[in-house]
Image (tube, grey):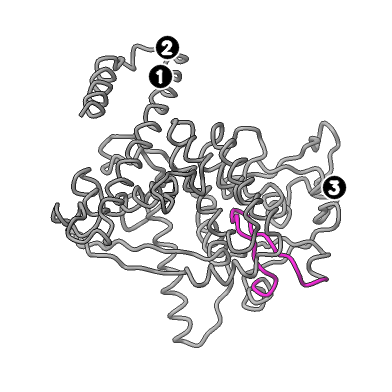
Amino acid sequence: MEATAAISAAIAAALAARPAFHDLTDDHLLDQLAAIEELGRITDALRLGAAREVELRSNPRLGEERLSFRSGARDGAELVRRVARIGHTEAKRRVGLGMALAPTITLLGQKVPGRFAPLAEAVEAGLVGIDSARVIIRTWGALRRRVRRELLDGMVLQLTDAAMSNDAEQMSDLAAAWAEILDPDGAEPRHDEQRRRRSLRIHDTLGDGTTRASLVLTPEHLAFLRELLQSRRRGVVLERTEPGSEDDPEASGGEWREGEAPDDGDPRTRAQQDYDTLFETLEAGTKAEQADVATEVTHETVVTITAAELLEQRGQGWAPGVLAGLPIPVIERRMCSGGTLLLVTGVDGEIMHFGRSRRLFSPAQRKALMVAAGGRCQYPGCRTPAPFLEAHHADWFQRDDGPTDIGNGTSC
């Protein structure tokens, strides 16, 4: 009861201290945002702890004494959902992460540090957010059968330190880099695991007649889908809607829409445009298959691999915007089916060169620069995605007599 009263008092104090944000200076506003987020991380840690304890008290081994049974719920996650008034998926995620970070109970009933002790301490202290914690645990789970325990422990410790100063997206990149360092030859075993996890699920139909669906994509199909969608986005002028306005009915924070509407309706959001691209392609492919005619490939996936790896038939290739590597057999199969270009690099990472006869970079050069940049803008701090990147001369064409070569190009 004392703990509940303390939490209630803390909530009351936070509400009483709530500032009028529009009156704050820019620096003070950002300081407030950081402080509020720290409070949010601590709140998330308390949520995980409470969900974990509900799950422990709802263990099926307790029979009719389990908390979920006495509360009329099927299991701990359902009880968390009811009491917290959240969705079933979020309740399961809280229970799962809370249990993963829990200390281990010995046969004598003593608590000892669990698998992720440094991470659990950082989460409990509000230093690491739950999104970053999930990235670390997911990476650990993918490597646990092929990497020694002491190496995994070191990875968790280093990633936990990194998570105190990096956001969840940056942590995904760092975790992928760690996976490649600890398991450089694991692309093919991971590919088998990825294929087992691939799925398309069609969920319940909503009240307005639409139906939600979810996809789990393998890296090769993610690379294919990215290039397909981006091939239709190029040249489309987008305008951002005002967050919270009538054009943002789901209060999702605003979104990008076409500047001009298609002939048959309103301007589409990027998500709607991608939806149309996907299903127009599926329909066109089905019609082409039924008519027994060949269709022209209008988009291509670039896969980069070193000459040494290709010669030795070991290692993996990389598609822009996809963190997981592609095994060589997968690359070869994709090349045979069309729509995939193989970009072979040398020892120093050289790709290809063109002379000064052209001022503008060719489509092949622009694609090579984009791949070399990892599908992201090379300007510090810019997060412009691949489809909106442009090729520029590092040494200016006119002023510096710079060549239109890959070695003098930058993607930004």
Helix, strand or loop at mark 2: loop
Asked if the residue under mark 3 is in contact with the one under mark 1, i.e. CB atoms within 8 Å, the reply is no
Residue type at numbered disc 2: Thr
Query: Looking at this rendering, what residue extends furthest in the front direction?
Result: 108
Residue at the image point whose x is 53% and y is 62% from the top:
222
Residue at numbered disc 1? 32
Who comes first in sequence, dot 2 or dot 3? 2
Indicate the amino acid at tag 3. Answer: Arg
Left or right of 125? Residue 66 is left
Q: Residue at x 20, y 60 (%)?
A: 74
**Quarter of the image where the C terminus is located:** top right
Q: Nearer the viewer, residue 211 or 145?
A: 145
Number of other residues with Cα within 10 Å of mark 1, as a class: few under 14, some 14 to 19, many 20 or more: some
Disc 2, disc 3: CB below 8 Å? no
Q: Quadrant of the N terminus?
A: top left
Sequence-earlier tag: 2 or 1 = 2
Quote the CA–CA distance across marks 1 and 3. 52 Å
The residue beneath circle 3 is 356
The disc placed on residue 378 is none
Percent from the top left, x then y, of residue 392?
A: 72, 41
In the image, 348: left or right of 15? Answer: right
* Residue 317 drawn in magenta: yes
Indicate the amino acid at tag 1: Gln
Pick whichever, 67 or 107, lies toward us: 107
Q: CA distance from mark 2 to mark 1?
A: 10 Å
Residue 294 versus residue 109 in the image, above or below: below
- The residue beneath circle 2 is 25
Residue 125 at x, y percent in the picture: 45, 30
- Find the magenta span and give its range: 312-330
